[in-house]
Amino acid sequence: MPARLPYAYKYLRAKKKFPHVWCPGCGIGIVMGSIIRAIDSLGWDLDDILMVSGIGCTSRMPVYVDFNTLHTTHGRALAFGTGAKMANPNLKVLAVMGDGDSMAIGGNHIIHASRRNMDITAIIVNNNNYGMTGGQFSPTTPQGAKTSTTPYGMIEPDFDICELTKAAGANYVARGDVYHVIELDGIVKNALSGSGFRVVEALAPCPTNFGRANRQGDAVNMMELLRDNTINIAQAKKLPEEKTEGKIVRGVFVDRDEIGYIERYRKLCDRVSAEVKK
Amino acid sequence: MPARLPYAYKYLRAKKKFPHVWCPGCGIGIVMGSIIRAIDSLGWDLDDILMVSGIGCTSRMPVYVDFNTLHTTHGRALAFGTGAKMANPNLKVLAVMGDGDSMAIGGNHIIHASRRNMDITAIIVNNNNYGMTGGQFSPTTPQGAKTSTTPYGMIEPDFDICELTKAAGANYVARGDVYHVIELDGIVKNALSGSGFRVVEALAPCPTNFGRANRQGDAVNMMELLRDNTINIAQAKKLPEEKTEGKIVRGVFVDRDEIGYIERYRKLCDRVSAEVKK
Amino acid sequence: MKYSEIRLAGSGGQGLGLAGRILSQAAILNGSEVCLTQSYGPEARGGASRTDVIISDKPILFPNCRELDVLLAMNQESADKFSAKVKETGFFVVDSTFVDQLPEGKVYEYPFTDKSIEVFGQKIVANLIAMGMFAALSKFFKLEIWTDAIRLAVPKAFLDLNLQAFEMGHREGREILHMEEGRIPVAWDRKQPVPKAIRDKFSR
Amino acid sequence: MKYSEIRLAGSGGQGLGLAGRILSQAAILNGSEVCLTQSYGPEARGGASRTDVIISDKPILFPNCRELDVLLAMNQESADKFSAKVKETGFFVVDSTFVDQLPEGKVYEYPFTDKSIEVFGQKIVANLIAMGMFAALSKFFKLEIWTDAIRLAVPKAFLDLNLQAFEMGHREGREILHMEEGRIPVAWDRKQPVPKAIRDKFSR
Amino acid sequence: MSEKPIKGQTKEEHCETEVKKRPAVHIFPEWCKGCGICVAFCPKQVLEMGKDQKAHVVYPEKCIECALCARRCPEFAVYVSGDSIKEGKKKNGGEK
Amino acid sequence: MSEKPIKGQTKEEHCETEVKKRPAVHIFPEWCKGCGICVAFCPKQVLEMGKDQKAHVVYPEKCIECALCARRCPEFAVYVSGDSIKEGKKKNGGEK
Amino acid sequence: MSGVPWGETKLVQGNEAVALGALASGIDFFAGYPITPSTEVAEILAREMPLIGKKWIQMEDEIASISAIIGGSLAGGRSMTATSGPGFSLMQEGLGYACMTEVPLVLVNVMRGGPSTGLPTQVAQGDVMQARWGAHGDHPAIVLAPSDVKECFNLTIRAFNLAEEFRTPVILMPDEVIGHMREKLTFPKEEEICVTPQSSPDVPLEWYEHYHTSATGVSPMAHFGSGYRFHVTGLTHDTHGFPTRKVDEVISKMNRLKQKITRRLDVLENNKLHDVEESKVVIFCYGSVYRSALAAQQILAKQRKKVGIFRPVTIWPFPDRTVKELLDTKDVIIVPELNQGQIIHEVERLTSDSVRVVPLHRYDGYAITPEQLVAAALEVM
Amino acid sequence: MSGVPWGETKLVQGNEAVALGALASGIDFFAGYPITPSTEVAEILAREMPLIGKKWIQMEDEIASISAIIGGSLAGGRSMTATSGPGFSLMQEGLGYACMTEVPLVLVNVMRGGPSTGLPTQVAQGDVMQARWGAHGDHPAIVLAPSDVKECFNLTIRAFNLAEEFRTPVILMPDEVIGHMREKLTFPKEEEICVTPQSSPDVPLEWYEHYHTSATGVSPMAHFGSGYRFHVTGLTHDTHGFPTRKVDEVISKMNRLKQKITRRLDVLENNKLHDVEESKVVIFCYGSVYRSALAAQQILAKQRKKVGIFRPVTIWPFPDRTVKELLDTKDVIIVPELNQGQIIHEVERLTSDSVRVVPLHRYDGYAITPEQLVAAALEVM
Ligand SMILES: Cc1ncc(C[n+]2csc(CCOP(=O)(O)OP(=O)(O)O)c2C)c(N)n1
Ligand SMILES: Cc1ncc(C[n+]2csc(CCOP(=O)(O)OP(=O)(O)O)c2C)c(N)n1
Ligand code: SF4
Ligand code: SF4
Ligand code: SF4
Ligand code: SF4
Ligand code: SF4
Ligand code: SF4
Ligand SMILES: [Mg+2]
Ligand SMILES: [Mg+2]
């Protein structure tokens, strides 16, 4: 064991809560790493950060990080986060959610947080299924995929998380994956350092459920799939269509600089209280 | 009184339920007319039609039409409709909702119905506020507008219903308004005659609440606003940008022919039951 | 002040909510207890509007009106619907602009809306004319209390207009009282037809 | 069959659910009552796995195990965690591939996983080898009942493999029993160290 | 009012008006709530608001049966005879 | 194994490796769950899976401190000394 | 064809038995959202229903799920959903709507440790009062609590039948122990099963009243698309289903809603009694605790001590009269529950001061053991 | 500055008084979703709060609203939401979460006619049992029911104070009559109001336990961003807030959750008694019905008949002991409620068979009149 623990441990509840609960090879831990590194490189004070989550494997993350941490009800992370951010705008609010959490039961909250441009960074670990409850399909399960509730293959079309939050009004929308982890680090850092509502979709393997049900092999095989089946938006633009077809595009899709809700609200208060004083 | 009642009365619960509950000049009745005319020209059997709604002024519509009618809970019309359509695919399901009903509390159901491409026609009467509860803001209230909960003007950005349902996957997405009623008739008819999930946003005045709060005058004035502040998509394309700026675009934005959920499910059943028989 | 139930009824947009608040405010300035309730519900959607005010010197327990002392009916529908609720000793004030079929009992009628349009060029202060007449007829409170109440309840921008309307109504009310006290019995018995002369006088 | 509690414990992916279902199915074919419960909860997430089976001739009322008759421990953690739950008269079957520290009591050990890899080229049938040995050692049911149970519980594609693994385990089990009944006392007392000779025999 | 073809009206339409004497447009007063929409947007000023706060057909002869009044009436209180409304034919003076 | 600069490595990096003898990459076995990710994607095959189902540093001298192993370890069980991981520097053999 | 292994003997899980019971009842439509410990119900039906052309859907959440099955039921499909604690809370508005609009459906709530997210994989009986009172306003409740896998199967069928017969939602509430355990189950033959057919009116179309007032309070119900066109609303409505605020119509609706249950307690009531008459001490229990009570009774019998057991299978409506009749004369009633005290309030309500009502509450996520009950009984004897 | 007309006498609506009471309590954050008959609370706060820099937001639904105020409260804002029936049902999951995680907040539920959409603009008291049992799992409940506009103001302040003191949601439940009526209200002077300050721990950062076990069961609570970093989860948790399934930790949490209420009934209990001791007939009532009871008492007094009135202001926790002590000796207790019988079950539970408990239920959307009560009283006298 190394004498000096890695810097990242500063951000973890390392002594009491590790090893964590996630399965071997689960991608959630890698996303947690990206978040930790982004925060470290931003130099944020741990006291100022609130990590809020819903329910699911991904949503267990707050247990492990040494910030202010809030593990809420299924799908409602953004609503809790909205309240916390409004009550204490100094908090840097980071919502960590699964694909089911954010897009199934929580779908309404994410489009409204996008519309309001609420000053929260939403990090969605998209493992294409409900990991925690044993691998049912989620709104991001690809057509044809097998899950415990699509034994004959998924027949519903899936959401493009990035398209949807973009249409709903989010300030920053990007997709990364846990194989391309340096890229993901950058995306998360970008997202965290902005204002308004920011969405990061991080593709990650769930070998235990999705991987097994779809015979995608172990974690390493699933990482290879991410390596081979995704393509960076810049690269994609250079390549002819047939080379990019069927590949999931990574990269930053929206990077607006619209004024966030918190600032709008502050301005409203300033304006009306000034009017009243007059 | 004319000896012969207009054909439309065939579709109305005219004897018992009229005059209806809506305020003088409320646009909802005009949308109801479009629906009736579209159905008449499609020659549908009244027994085959299910009109389902949520809660709100708009959602009172099912009382007045002589179909199978279902007035549900606030925001859930599409979920109820989904169940009814699945249990009895012969029903032509028509969901009539307000902007609050469909986009605030019901936002999740509309994006999921869009994603699934569920075979329902959603008609949203967008009067830019919660009419029924006395004119609070809704997710479609324009910035700056006054409502009973934005006494100092709306500070939140609003949804573009058409953009959002398009991104979520709806088969058909169009916007009309009650001034341009012939166009609206056509849009509604188109929507009804398709398959998969179809969305019609119908702009309509709520003179009692939105109109009064924003000093837009009476129903006639509000109709004039619709006349002057909207523009057909075909026209808009022809005009230079400065002429269309600030105008709301009417017309058909999406007209896909993706296979709807009901058909997909039928195919699934056929496939798996065939496999089992083998 | 003895326990009194007053109902102000008409259609949405006739300003009966404001009228009720003025009456209640007057009661408060008078040191009385007051309890105001309003109609909600579908009928309130651009349709009927009803404001009930109970005034009393003792605490008001049950908040709803059961036997009206006064009914102000600003349209035919309310006159019809609520007339049976008016006590034997109670009276009606009706807007004859809209009410043709007078209820039976002691009725004061006056074309509030027509007069509002005629005198002020808009129908919007019919309610204040009516309240003015009501103030005079009811004798509940002194005039200053009423005007103070109006000052508290009405937005500044509309205050003058409202006060003028109220005063006009009050003047007409006082005139009626003079008549009653003098020559003609204006307090008709229930069941008795309304004397044509009086009707003409009011609707001049 | 007398009331017996059996726990099959190890880690996720070792196929103890299937083992439990085979055992239960055998009990059913035997005409016994059976009740199977499983661990759920966070520890089931890729971590620990536990299947409890109660078999009895009479209806089984309380469904949870309290005093184990048999513990099959497929890893060290389960051996440690549950050994105290095993009755004085009960016994252990452990996978010596993973279990170094044997529990105290009557322990049968065998490197199920190693053997599975060795003989079948994959670790996936360690569970069936273990069940085979369990079948022999427990003497609960006749062999045909077990094989019928496997036929019912295992998907066709994997049936042969599973049957072979089961038979191998059963064979080894019978051999142990012969030894016990003959020369060497295999049923060690609690507290007594495990005779080296036997360990070697099993891990050949 | 003039019986001559109204400007912008085709010959046939004018003839139609000529032939049938009964007014083509009817208001059902029990349902009319007096919003004024039909009056304001009738391309031919056929209608007027009455003192009773209801719409009235004042110049039936000018009516071109475009049925816009019926389509826009939120109360289903307007009836235009003939089938024009059903077919969605836009005869004249349609929408801007 | 060869002490020569590995193909694709810059001179400095090789020197760095030369200078510090202590292995730059460490695995914390208590946390390693043996998923094999670090092993599979180490650009220099520094790591191997042990019989104990944990990753082990087998060829520390080959390590280029790209920290990809640490970044991709879902368990925070890998530590690469130096600050490279913090800064997100991609030294060599990075992602495809 | 139906997916039910008629006549066979199998190892079956409680949740599986619920799913198979639904298939046996001819379920047409299932809509749900996964949640531990009820998930298997949905998963098994997802596998079986498409095979026989029945409709299955996973909705975006629990609110959508209950909404969908109400829609499905009104459109003529026998409908069910399954959930647990948090999902059950989310379904309350929809449940209340179904009660008000008198829509038959089956709602399965497999009870886990609460409150809130609580102990998701562990057992509790913490939703018993919620099942009665969880939605706003007065509303009827029929709630059944199985104690073994066989009952999971049978009571699911009964739930479908009662839903049909009473035109109301019926809630089936296995606790986690019952939902997750596997037992030997011999399925009946198909012809042994009694399934109440869906009602349909036979009056002429114009005569049809969706809420016709009948002697039982329930009348045959038409479905959307059948040619009987009717209106349904959660607003208080008249016999045709149209909103009303008329006092007499409101009262008549509300009375019927209540009385269709209270007047037919005979049909609904279902108690398992063991030695109640002859015992001075009675254990009053339900769900998985009943099993422990039976075990405790046996243990005590060996010590020549007698306790009775009163177990309501239908827990709501509560068997008021029977409890009063049979238990008001006892010395002690022990009420063991996997919660902090819920049904015990009803027992207290119905018994006099002379009867000692002793709680035994366990709420740590584990089952009450026979030994705990034995100890409790010995203490009061 | 606070928007409260301190010291003035005004005509004030019940809902308005709630909003002003919240302002008087120093509300920092309101999140809500409009619904009749509670809407005015939100509307008035939307007008007042931005003027003083306080945070107000209209969320996308009621679930988001309660979620937001829980987040807001944890982040240090005094928080409130307001709703009615259907919204209250939707809030149950969140409410249970707040109970479990011990988050202070005020939830106003202005009761309208149910079940379901029911009679949205009319009066009822149909959510009384739901307020106690509406969420899954055992959870604490503190519920206050005002009877006049002044109480709307005062009890809102009390609700904020109790929420703080007990670290739990407090539910304020005016019925529609009380929420919508306007009365004369003389506001107190600012200094007359007693507002419990938000707690904050003073232990060193490392010592802080978010759920420290104290004598009262409640310990000072830190807020997000204060430097005390802690974890909050709806899973059953240890004293630090981290999930646990250890039996002793689970039991200790659950016991504390219950006992922090039951052990301090003295603080919570609040009854208005009128001639209870000297009367053989007592009217047990709450909310707007209390007014009718007072009126009935006066009418009866004129006829030289005596009835007592027992009115709990805090309806949950129910005043068990006082009811038993004071009412178990009476001849008749009349329990008038604007529902089909809810609180009456508690009265029945606590009184012996010798006491006649007579229901008087009205559920047609209208208030119980004094005359109805007089008639009921005369009948039993
Ligand atoms: C209201 C409610 N419904 C359902 C559940 C059950 N549940 C827990 S986690 C989960 C889905 C998890 O999927 P996802 O959000 O994708 O997270 P993952 O586990 O895949 O990281 C569900 C359905 C719940 N806890 N609460
Ligand atoms: C669960 C729930 N929340 C809130 C309400 C109150 N409510 C009734 S209608 C409505 C909004 C209506 O607005 P919209 O959908 O735009 O319809 P409109 O009245 O404008 O046609 C609301 C908030 C309700 N009935 N149920
Ligand atoms: S179940 Fe899937 S998502 Fe959950 S911890 Fe395991 S691998 Fe990760
Ligand atoms: S309130 Fe508005 S939306 Fe509702 S009926 Fe009146 S005008 Fe129409
Ligand atoms: S049909 Fe056309 S022209 Fe005739 S009245 Fe109507 S709007 Fe006017
Ligand atoms: S549009 Fe209809 S309601 Fe309006 S004035 Fe004309 S006829 Fe009357
Ligand atoms: S990536 Fe981490 S957990 Fe996986 S094998 Fe390497 S060190 Fe172990
Ligand atoms: S730092 Fe890079 S080269 Fe070194 S072991 Fe890790 S992945 Fe391999
Ligand atoms: Mg997921
Ligand atoms: Mg609207």
Image (cartoon, coloured by chain):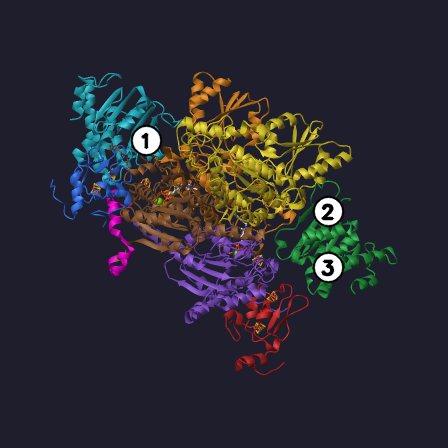
Chain colours: A purple, B brown, C cyan, D green, E blue, F red, G yellow, H orange
Please tell me whether the stretch drawn in magenta is mainly helix, strand or loop: helix
Q: Is residue B224 one of those drawn in magenta? A: yes
Pick the residue in front: D22 or D9.
D22
On what subunit does the disc labeled 2 rest? D
Q: Amino acid at mark 1?
A: Thr
- Is residue G208 shown above or below D114? above
Q: Which mark is residue C14?
A: none
Residue A88, horizontal then vertical, whole percent: 44, 53
In the image as oriented, which residue stretches furthest toward the bottom?
F4
Q: Residues within 10 Å of mark 3 (few under 14, many from 20)?
A: many
Q: Are marks 3 and 1 in contact (CB under 8 Å)?
A: no
User: Was residue F13 drawn as part of the magenta stretch in this picture?
Assistant: no
Secondary structure state at the residue bearing disc 2:
helix
**Rendered image: mark on residue D29:** 2
Would you say residue A66 is visible in this rendering? yes
Q: Are marks 3 and 2 in contact (CB under 8 Å)?
A: no
Task: Give the numbered dot on residue C51.
Answer: 1
Label 3 SS: helix
- Residue located 58% across and 79% down the image: F17
Location of residue C48 by image quarter: top left
Using the image, tell me which numbered label, if any, was put on residue D165. Answer: 3
Residue at far front of view: B278
Q: Is residue B40 left or right of residue H328?
A: left
